[in-house]
Amino acid sequence: MTDDLGAAGLRFERDGALGWCIIDRPHARNALTAAMYYGVKRAVALVNTDPDLAALIITGVGDVFAPGGDLGARDDPGDVVPEILGPDIVPFLAVRDSPAPVISAVNGICQGGGLLIAAMSDIAVVSDRATFRVPELLRGIPDATYAAVLPAHVGLAVARDLLLSGRRFDAAEAQRIGLISRVVPHESLREAAIQAAGEVLQTAPQARLHVKRMLNERYGLIDYQTMFWSLEHSTETHEGMRAFMEKRAPSWVPAQFAADRTRR
């Protein structure tokens, strides 16, 4: 396997035993294409098959980690989109189940699929400048991974709040509710991520894998069938994505709340 992740918006760099998957698509604010989602999965596979690598750190550039998928469905020159569909493209379970440690170094805006990558990592090390949101329902997407994962991290009441409101929250709140574990000064993020990787690598690999399996049993069933049917066929999903691209409120929002741009 080569270091080419098959996506123009991703870079893979080596730092001794560490591999860095860098989300670098500034012209689209790091929005993830299908090739990028699958490229993160390739990065996980790479650190688990290359004997010179022991752990993966995922981070972004500028003031954005990852805002989720590119709702304009745009690809970049050089993207290699795999001939697979649905849940086999997204990397969330690959990140969660990786025998090699996966650390997310969250440098800025983190929402949608980006927040799922961070939440599924072994440790999310977060800049004190980072902000978060779970915006899927604002786009008409019944996200199955969030419905299964979020209650296990933050409890049912907080999961309802974040999923049903789509509100933004900062790094301090994300740590307080248990969504992420470590918040550090922005300028210390790289060093803190490397330290976290080194700490996990002190533990015995096989025993660690068993503990991860037992921890992952806390997650619920992921109903991908409903989610991916909606992405293809739901009029709400199509309207939500069009409204986002057209910078307006979706048609289901009552008129008195349609001017609230904080929800878009």
Image (cartoon, rainbow, N blue to C red):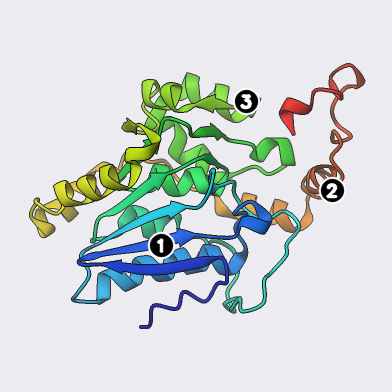
- The alpha-carbon separation of the residues under discs 2 and 1 comes to 30 Å
- The alpha-carbon separation of the residues under discs 3 and 2 comes to 20 Å
Question: SS class of the residue under badge 3?
Answer: loop
Q: Name the residue under label 2.
A: 242
Tag shown at residue 21: 1
The N terminus sits in image quarter: bottom left
Instruction: Please name the amino acid that badge 2 sits on.
Output: Arg
**In which quadrant of the rendered view does residue 246 lie?**
top right
Please state the horizontal and vertical placement of residue 236, each as a whole percent of the image: 80, 43
Is 244 positioned to the left or the right of 54 in the image?
Answer: right
Question: SS class of the residue under badge 1?
Answer: strand
Question: SS class of the residue under badge 2?
Answer: helix
Of the numbered discs 1 and 3, the one sitting upstream in the chain is 1
Disc 3 residue crowd, few under 14, some 14–19, many 20+, Cα 10 Å = some
Instruction: Please name the amino acid that badge 3 sits on.
Output: Arg
The mark tally for this picture is 3
Instruction: Please name the amino acid that badge 1 sits on.
Output: Cys
Residue at 67% x, 58% y is 27
Residue at 54% x, 49% y is 66
Tell us which disc is closer to us: 2 or 1: 1
Q: Name the residue under label 3.
A: 167
Please state the horizontal and vertical placement of residue 252, each as a whole percent of the image: 85, 31
